[in-house]
Image (cartoon, rainbow, N blue to C red):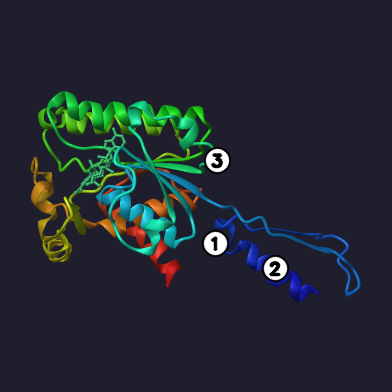
Amino acid sequence: MNKLLMILTCMCNDYSLSNLGVRCSYVEANVQEDNGSSAIDVVADIKTERVVVLGGSGFVGSAICKAAVSKGIEVISLSRSGRPSYSGSWVEQVTWLPGDVFYANWDEVLPGATAVVSTIGGFGNEEQMQRINGEANVLAVTAAKDYGIPKFILISVHDYNLPSFLLSSGYFAGKRKAESEVLSKYPRTGVVLRPGFIYGKRKVDGFEIPLDLIGEPLERLLNATGNFTKPLSSLPASDLLLAPPVSVDDVAFAVINAVIDDDVFGVFTIDQIKEAAAKVKVQNQ
Ligand SMILES: NC(=O)c1ccc[n+]([C@@H]2O[C@H](COP(=O)([O-])OP(=O)(O)OC[C@H]3O[C@@H](n4cnc5c(N)ncnc54)[C@H](OP(=O)(O)O)[C@@H]3O)[C@@H](O)[C@H]2O)c1
């Protein structure tokens, strides 16, 4: 009996089980060496995740949807174009909702979600960049909070060590505004990922652009030379050359790590994104 209790205690302490929300309870007092006793009470309460990916049809968003499906997470994507033309069995397992984040009917999107992930962002003129990187995300964070969604994960961007006058441009200013909203409305569960250049296979108008052909060797080279180039990182804008690219799968798995681990919150640098992704990938093996 004591042996069995020890095994159950170890199981309860196991990281992956606690992550899944497996709860064990047993009566500690009055445990007797009596096999007929019903002192052990094991309650398996498996937490199911349901993630809403804003922009799930995009380059980063689709990798997040795919990674989430691979982990058995229920996924809903919202984007103006709705269902994308990607192939693969994971595509069938995502609920693709068409809709603009500025006019979304959140009643159809958010109820029951355990996390919202926003990949919304992009380029344009100053006003457009403020709107899509900043206002769209502020609106989404507000909606998620109003609907009581416990977690919000934002794909932001590395600052490349740029001088402040460049960081005040619509793209970066919008991103920082969105970050502040996430961190203030979700101080204990909000996650902001700040990747630099993201590589992978990007689909544009039906064509696949293999960004990994450049990104992967560049990432290896910059990682290998990191110790030598570190002193240069104090130079303004040096990270435009020195910030290592990150694979789209690493960004996606760092998101998954944030979704399944309730202890994860705050701002994640490029290196931290890779570390977080590695945790989930290890569990996958
Ligand atoms: N790619 C990189 O190297 C890189 C690097 C650092 C940071 N980031 C950030 O990562 C995020 C994702 O980048 P990405 O390369 O995956 O961009 P992307 O391929 O353009 O994806 C953006 C997604 O957002 C959706 N979207 C845009 N406006 C919307 C709106 N008003 N309502 C609903 N959905 C909307 C798009 O779909 P529809 O057009 O169909 O609506 C698309 O699914 C962005 O915030 C970007 O700033 C990217």
Q: Mark 3 against mark 1, which lies toward the viewer?
A: 3
> Quarter of the image containing the N terminus?
bottom right
- Lower sequence index among marks 1 and 2: 2
Q: Amino acid at mark 3?
A: Gly
Disc 3/disc 1 C-alpha distance (Å): 25 Å
Q: Is residue 217 left or right of residue 255?
A: left
- Which x, y percent locates residue 167? 15, 32
Q: Amino acid at mark 2?
A: Leu
Residue type for callout 1: Tyr
* Residue sitting at x 10%, y 57%: 229
Secondary structure of the residue carrying tag 1 is: helix
Disc on the earlier residue, 3 or 1: 1
Residue 8 badge = 2
Is the CB–ligand 1 distance for label 1 below 8 Å?
no
51 or 231: nearer the viewer: 51
Give the quarter of the image for residue 4.
bottom right
* Contact flag, marks 3 and 1 (Cβ < 8 Å): no
Q: Which residue is pictured at 10% across the width and 47% down the height?
A: 240
Q: Which residue is mark 3?
A: 112
For marks 2 and 3, give the one nearer the viewer.
3
Residue 19, picture quadrant: bottom right
